[in-house]
Amino acid sequence: MKWSNRWIWPVLFLALACGPKLPSDLETPPVPDLTAVESSVREQLGTERAELDRQLESGVEPAELAAAFGRMGQLYHAYELLPPAAACYRNTLRLDADNPQWRYYLGGVYRRQGRLDDAAEILGEALDGAPDSAPLRLRLGQVALARDRPAEARGHFERALTADADCAAARYGLGEAARAEGDLEGAAEHFQKTLDEQPYALQVLYPLGQTLLRLGREEEGRRYLDRSAQRRMSVGARPTCSDPWDEELSGFTRSAAAHLTRGLHAAYGGRHEEALGEYRKALELAPDDPVVRQSMGSALAATGDLAGALEQYREAVRLAPEDPDLNQDLGVVAAGLGQLDLARKHLETALELSPGSSTARLQLAGVAQREGRFERAAGLYAQVLAAEPGNQQAQMERVKCLVRLGRTAEATRELGRFVDRQPPEDAHERMRLAMLLAGLGDVARAKRHLAAVLEMEAPPAVHAQARAALGRLR
Amino acid sequence: MPDAPPIFTEEASARGLDFVHFNGMSGGLYIAEVMGAGVAVFDYDNDGDLDVYLVQGALLDDTELGATTFPPSEAMRPLTDRLYRNDLENGEPSFVDVTEESGLNATGFGMGVATGDVDNDGWIDLYVTNLGSNQLWRNRGAGAEGAASNTVTFEDVTAASGADDERWSVSSTFLDFDRDGLLDIYVTNYVDFTVAGNKRCKSLTGAPDYCGPISYRPQGDRLLRNLGGNGARGAASNTVQFEDAGVAAGIAGEAGSGLGVVSGDFDVDGRTDLYVANDGMPNRMWLQQAGGGFRDEALNRGSALSLEGMAEAGMGVVAGDVDADGDEDLLITHLALETNTLYLNDGTGFFDDVTVASGLGSPSFTMTGFGVAFLDFDNDGWLDLMAANGAVKVIPDLVAERDPYPLHMPNLLFQHLGEARGGPRFEDVSRRAGEDFRRSEVSRGLATGDLDNDGDVDVVISNNNGPARLLINQIGTERHWLGLRLVGEATARDMLGARVGVERSDAPTLWRRVRTGGSYLSANDPRVLVGLGGTAEVESVVVEWPSGKMESFEAVADQYSTLSEGSGVEVE
């Protein structure tokens, strides 16, 4: 780490000699290499450092200097520049030992650096100033869990909940502590409550499902695990707790990447307008970044503004013409707007660039189908099925194409084989396929699958429909 | 009190293992350049000692070789994978580069290597994975047509055998999943990265950085079933043939950013299963079903996600019986801030994450792990652990030091302390493990084997953009050991998948499996090396052969023995 001796030591010397009495053990925070960082970030860090310089030079009171070091530390911390952040926080604590916020931040830095014992110590000291801080208790509990001290963790999580009854992260922590202590009933209860309080905290589905399985509550457990399997992304899925100190920290980052990250979190939380706001800020800083354009396009599409999305994707593809994802996204949105020529062009490009992409192939098949090119579409669906034999959408659409081509017997045969080989686990889906088979004339197979639907777990209405269909076929 | 001797000494260059990896770096921050490469230890020439195969990178774009960020030395040119023959004498390994005479000419952007005898001729073959087409190198044995009588050569049979995969393949492993006596291949494929479609990613400060897998589309893996040399698809009858068995096996179409794979019998039903570590996506546990085919049970069985329900960045994976209860446990290496994860098998294929309680969590929290091995380095009968580390995103502290390659990290060695609170307990002993553990490099592959045949496990580590390291064990022979090679009845092929139980008086049976796969991009010694601790007494050795046959053998400690299927006493 390169240490800057350029500015702080002469200034400190001056300050120590002329100004108010400062501690002699102040550290020189290492200066990160900022040559490659975004100009807005460089400017932000430079301005803050200059302000710190100014305060040091002017011999301000220790409390004021502590705040300046604290702010500098926050800035480094927010950008994950941890060694300089830690040094700034330590200086702050030398100048202002009573403020728990700086200890909280320093504990967070130590935690990320893997210094669990140091983190526990500094966070513990912060309790003197804020014994009822829910975020502080929460972090202490998390560190205790990482140090394999579940009983200690439990105490902190309980105190966090006392301080803030809505702190779902602490509730979840109680579940983790209970599980670590072998109390599976307690763990399941806490996980369930966490999910009740924050249904979007989908991360909890998995530990809850696993705990229920271990308790022998298999059906219940598998239900949660099935839901867990359906979620693709983990962004924004953790249980949360109101944490003003942490919010203050995240407010410092102003890079395009930081706005993108915040936008992504908002988008996965379903807060598309908020996501759009963040992406707009990112776009101002990095108008030529195709990822920003893509994210913007995605958010616009999610809000129903397909024309706006198309514009963003077009720009993204202009910036990165050989990116298969961008070409695919552009193709999908163009198809959604009925611009089939444009859609075909970019989906074909996407496939050329990423020949294994079943998604692009499926979309291209859809375009061909809409253009009435059923032979082409059927061929593309067959290619998807060769790679993904269980792809129900591809099989269904291929069957429709074959019917349109007059190849009914082939369609019936294929669909029959597909349903026999991979009968849908969802009763409604299975009934749909059975009815399609009946429509194609394969009544025997349709009846067999309808009968199977009656044996499946399903809402009464689905069973009633299956019974009625069976009656009609008889 | 004198200092304890180091556990391992690093002797690569002293022993002639002078390989240096080239990663193709040219400023484009291509994700592929930081992911390779692997290493295999195997006895290619059947002379009884382990040789070393190291996978090399290549140029990724049209940059001139000399203008790349870290141009290769003249000694490493032309850029090809390298085969080093071990001329072991009096317990002293010595390596000679025999790439050229071997006929091996692997010039792709290399990732990993797997070892296994695909044609049952008693000579170990190689499957090399690349960014792009893979290669199956058939070992022709000594004195094949056009070669000197004592020279072992290889031929590229990729196209003729149907074993290729043009995607970005990473780790692969040989296994006989259908128990037909022929070794099949499982290949993990990562994401759909291409140089032309390279994405530009940034850190939180806006500084350019390597992209993660989330920037690209995950790919499906491939299961290649060995059809034997039956002349299928018009090939010569002596040419081994593979078919893509993914559809029939039920693994096709399940995309995942796979990096690591290991085979085993995780649900203890006698059938071969697979565990795949995915990067940033749920891992998969492919359990083979009674009627054939595989089903992914990772989510139900507790081995898909972290304890908190998050998909982690699975890199390397290793299986072994760390709690000596007879089943196979799993360890997966991960990205920094995630810890490595130890899953304990409950004996029925359900897994508990015991990372924190085992002591493995905290030391691995700041490390990005790749290659990994359960290895009993002190021969006390408990499986210890080694992890090869190196970041995939630039480390700001190193950038501030103007480090030219700011991804390096030290490797870790953990000693198994036995059982505590009902589970295994490990201690980080890296500080006294030897000088190599004080180095900081971008390590990727890790392969284990007894390279000096002295009865303790040695290690070869492959570094991205750096020299290979040879770690010679200095302490294992202080205790007793048992070395076993398990070969087939019809041919002297290593019986990958066989399970060995070493029965001892007044101590639990030690169970090990014959496998070369696991770790990351790498292949291990197929021989089984079992630490016996302070006693040389072995009651018997039980072998469960892949055919299902079970036999008992007598064995003598402190030496290697070859056990042939059919030559033991059959056990019910």
Image: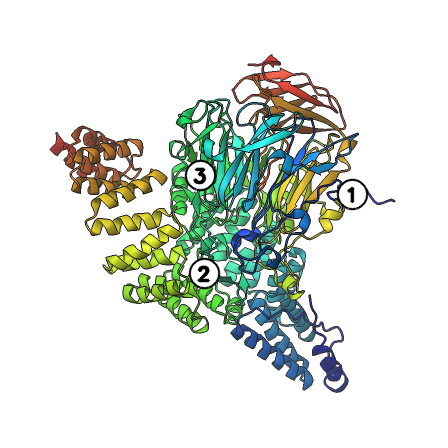
Q: Which residue is mark 3?
A: B300
Residue B3 location, x and y as percent?
Answer: 84, 45
Q: Nearer the viewer, residue A182 or B24?
A: B24
Q: Amino acid at mark 2?
A: Asp
**Are discs 3 and 2 both within one chain?**
no
Q: Are marks 3 and 1 in contact (CB under 8 Å)?
A: no
**Are discs 3 and 1 both within one chain?**
yes
Disc 1 packing (10 Å; few <14; some 14–19; many ≥20) = some
Quarter of the figure with residue B366: bottom right
Is B293 placed above or below A277 here?
above
| Residue projecting furthest to the front | B146
Which residue is located at x 74 percent, y 21 percent? B537
Q: Amino acid at mark 3?
A: Asn
Question: Dot 1 lies on which element?
Answer: loop
The residues bearing labels 3 and 2 have C-alpha atoms spaced at a distance of 30 Å
Residue B49 location, x and y as percent?
Answer: 70, 29
Residue A167 location, x and y as percent?
Answer: 48, 60
Q: Which residue is mark 1?
A: B6
Q: Which residue is mark 2?
A: A166
Disc 3 packing (10 Å; few <14; some 14–19; many ≥20) = many
**Label located before the other in sequence (3 or 1):** 1
Question: Dot 2 lies on which element?
Answer: loop
Q: Amino acid at mark 1?
A: Pro
Q: Nearer the viewer, residue A215 or A301?
A: A301
**Chain letter behind tag 2:** A
Question: Dot 3 lies on which element?
Answer: helix
